[in-house]
Amino acid sequence: MCLGVPGKVLDIREERGTRMATVDFGGVTKNVCLAYLPEAAVGDYTIVHAGFAITQLDEASALETLQMFRDLGYFDDEMGAEGVSP
Amino acid sequence: MKYLDEFADPDLARSLLAEIAAVTTRPWAIMEVCGGQTHSIIRNGIDQLLPPEIELVHGPGCPVCVTPLEMIDRALAIASRPDVIFCSFGDMLRVPGSELDLFAVRARGGDVRVVYSPLDAVTIAEEHPDRQVVFFGVGFETTAPANAMSVHLARRRGLTNFSMLVSHVLVPPAIEAVMSSPSCRVNGFLAAGHVCTVMGDREYLPLAERFHVPIVITGFEPLDVLDGIRRCVMQLEAGRGEVENAYARAVRSEGNATARAMLDEVFQVCDRQWRGIGMIPASGWQLTEAYADFDASLRFDVGSLTVAEPERCRAGEVLQGLLKPDQCECFGVECTPRTPMGATMVSSEGACAAYYLYRRSGLEPVEVRRG
Ligand code: SF4
């Protein structure tokens, strides 16, 4: 039950006073409650647990992390360090 | 899917592995607390790709595994009542109680339903005013906001036939228990990223300081796990013991304040038994006094329960990182995901089931991959 994966907010609506969204998880869509993420907008990526969006994915920081990983590899190549063979 | 493939890139995984190998000079034991990370590590063969000095120790962070036997038996007793519709997350149905599991109760005519969200259980209660609807509220801090909201909504909607059997557990007291154990051999922790999306990082600061142990908040994709390990090893090699966030795209230092406010309203801290481990003080949540009307353990008197674990199951040692699943003599013989003897063989977040699913073949993984 703890495996939360990122999904994309497709639409947002109000249901009996609660903010709900349709979220796409790579082709599977689910009804998700936005009560804990009221600022979420259509197109955002969010992590969902038990039908509730609990956090928003920050694109800038995702790209920054990936760039840092790439730089690590670059420096290893520069210094001739051996990659771990698969 | 965005941010999934990127964080499973084999080339970047290789450079992270090389970096880990380059900074490691001594043996270190690192515990991943969360069962979701255990799953990712075993599925991708990460433990087998690390330098031999680094040992990954699987922690107690699988809610299916640590829900106490007494609570499972209580759930089974409530679910067996003819007036009850018992709703649960799917992975709780095969967890063995002393004699039965929820599947067996259903086969005997019990109305046991799998729901995706506790809100579905609230809807079922509205649709069946003549029946008692009980939701099995288990999980760590990640599922707790959903469970809290469903109790809150049930009250707001005036439902008198909805209640929750609450067995919530908390991560920081588990880390404290692991570190306080005399047999502890853990040098650093990967903290569960999704728990921290709700709770933030603040609870971990006093733990890192008191035990001088690195606690690295870590995500779930292969590169996330490798980066968590890398940062943890770098701290250990430098003699540091700090809280660090390796999952910045999802975790903010303050967590989710709206969710935490709801948790404060609905739940209060209590002592909790952990299956296979024992009582950990102040390690769980139960409903507050204001929500006691919604407490299924008060609403349904199930008499006294005598609980009995199978003697040969060593899940307790597995959960504390003292034993690897395949060292248990029942592993893969009498005990399989179809015939689990212990809860760690039930959900794929349990270490025994993860080993069974991904390790039995004996094949070495060829590269970090997504299966
Ligand atoms: S393999 Fe089965 S019997 Fe052995 S510790 Fe794991 S759950 Fe228990």
Image: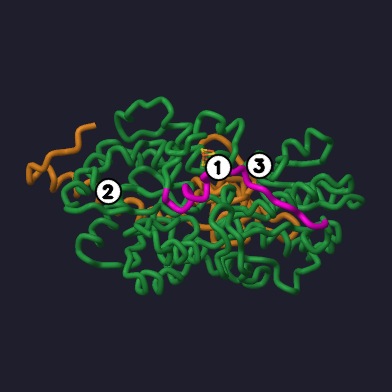
Chain colours: A orange, B green
Instruction: Report the residue marked by disc 1.
Output: B313
State the separation of the CA atoms marked 2 and 1.
27 Å
Q: Which mark is residue B96?
A: 3
Q: Which kind of residue does numbered mark 1 sit on?
A: Cys
Where residue B176 appears, x then y in whole percent? 45, 66
Callout 1: SS? loop
Whether label 1 lies within 8 Å of ligand 1 gets the answer yes
Counting other residues with Cα less than 10 Å from the Cα at mark 2, is it few (<14), some (14-19), or many (20 or more)? many
Res. A37 visible in picture: no
Q: Chain ID for label 2?
A: B
* Disc 3 from disc 1: Cα separation: 12 Å
> The magenta stretch spans which residues?
B303-322
| x and y percentages locating residue B350 in the rendered image | 51, 43
Q: Is residue B14 visible?
A: yes
Q: State the residue position of label 2.
A: B54
Task: Kindly identify which chain the residue marked by label 1 belongs to.
Answer: B
Q: Mark 3: give few (<14), some (14-19) or many (20+) Cα within 10 Å.
A: many
The one nearer the camera, B243 or B248, is: B243
Q: Secondary structure at mark 3?
A: loop
Nearer the observer, disc 2 or disc 1?
Answer: 1
